Image (cartoon, grey):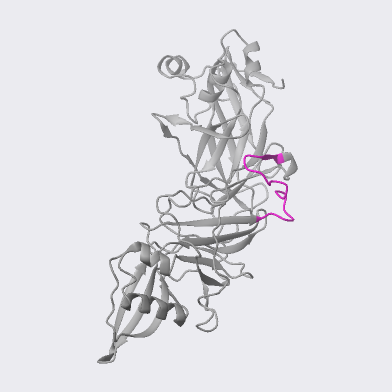
Amino acid sequence: MLFKLIKANALLPGLALLLACSRPGDVGLELPSPNATPGVVRIDTLTVRVSTVWRDSVLTSGANFLLVGQYRDPRLGLITATGYARLGWDGPYAPAADEAFDSLALELGPNPYRYGDTTQLQRLEVRRLLAPLVPGRPYYAGESVAVSPLLLNQAAGALATFRAGPSRRRLRLRLADALGRELLQAGQQGRLTNEAQLAAVLPGLALAPGPADDAALLLPLAATQLRLYTHTPAAPTVARSRSFGLGASTAHFYRVAADRSGTLLASLSASNRAIASAQTAREAYLAGALGLQLRLEIPYLADLRALAAHPVVVAAEATFETLPGSAGRGLAPPATLFAYLSGRGGQRGPALGTGGAATPLNYLGGGPSRTGFETGRYQLPLATYCQAVIDRQLPNYGLLLAPSTLQLPERVVLGGPGNAAAPLQVKVYVVR
């Protein structure tokens, strides 16, 4: 056990009222001053352990978007996102027998959300799925499905390049004429009268980044659609079209993979495995879609019972600072984190909060740090957890911090114990 006691010797305003009206741990972020009141001690130094935990079970089929793109994160490695979607059904397609094919295009709706370096050129590669996705089946970020090696937008000419931002214009990708003629012919032959027939002709589409891309992750809107253009000989200048949506109501998901070679997380290769911040330059990493979460452990909390028969935690808090300069261009930290109880092996348990709702830990931007770079912080109230551990009402397996929206790629780098640029601060105040 390692902790130091600092006795308080000044009156703490409202302490009696606080203890009478609040459960221990409901103090929030209003911590007592180091010189508070007789009987209140601050645990000046506690053994604290921080690690990065990887969970590969992030559900992405429940999102109303597809995540597509690739960029190189200086700390997390090469991040690649590929989207898969089954075509939506909007009723039978029965074109006239004399309709002639014009073109086939994948149209991506505009969306202002970008992540990564939006100044770089990137491209999208479109392929067909070899088997349809199963409606209602959950799909996770670590999964992939079989796709054709043939690029559907290669046959239409050179692959179009674009910059992810700040433009909000629609993106239109011309696809192979052969696929368009296949859809038209199937409709004329009466083979597109129901959703199962459509899935048999075209099981779905895969959207992947170019292999050399080092650009933003693109978030297409759910309004993305495949559009087939035709005309009739009687009216050759009048365009006809039929759209097949890739909207939120269709079966869809996206895979997110990280090549961690050459990074401090290279050894993190198994789900729920943790790597201590002492092995990662005293840093810890959180990234939603990548499944990276922070685990905080205070192993000797129960030893505070040596202070008194029934020590009462007046207030406790952990302050996590972001590493100066770690955000970078287009790499904003998550606006909110949630805290969860951890299992013995790092599994995520119930959320910390009241009334069954998780308590949000909002990102608090700050000014220049010790190094002169912009920094920020998250503050985690710990009093309820500490009290429960001291009272032996809860096993002391620690807590997990994760972004509130796991499906997004947003990440943050936080300082662990002993990090000089962004030191982790844990304060516990006890009445004995």
Q: Residue furthest left?
A: 234
- Relative horizontal placement of residue 20, taking residue 99 as reference (left or right): right
In the image, the segment drawn in magenta is 259-277
Q: Residue at x 69, y 21 (%)?
A: 4
Q: Residue at x 57, y 20 (%)?
A: 389
As displayed, is residue 102 above or below residue 371? below
Residue 99, given in percent of the width and then of the height, sits at: 30, 85
Q: Residue 398 falls in which quadrant of the image?
A: top right
| Camera-side residue of 17 and 219 | 219
Look at the image and tell me in which quarter the N terminus lies. Answer: top right
- Relative horizontal placement of residue 162, taking residue 264 as reference (left or right): left
Residue 333 painted magenta:
no
The answer to whether residue 332 of the structure is visible from this angle is yes
Look at the image and tell me in which quarter the C terminus lies. Answer: top right
The answer to whether residue 114 of the structure is visible from this angle is no
As displayed, is residue 277 above or below residue 16? below
Q: Main secondary structure of the magenta part?
A: loop
Q: How many marks?
A: 0
Residue 262 painted magenta:
yes
Residue 168, given in percent of the width and then of the height, sits at: 42, 70
Residue 388, given in percent of the width and then of the height, sits at: 53, 20
- Relative horizontal placement of residue 180, taking residue 310 as reference (left or right): left
- Relative horizontal placement of residue 130, taking residue 170 as reference (left or right): right
As displayed, is residue 153 above or below residue 14? below
| Camera-side residue of 162 and 431 | 162
Residue 382, given in percent of the width and then of the height, sits at: 54, 28
| Camera-side residue of 387 and 316 | 387
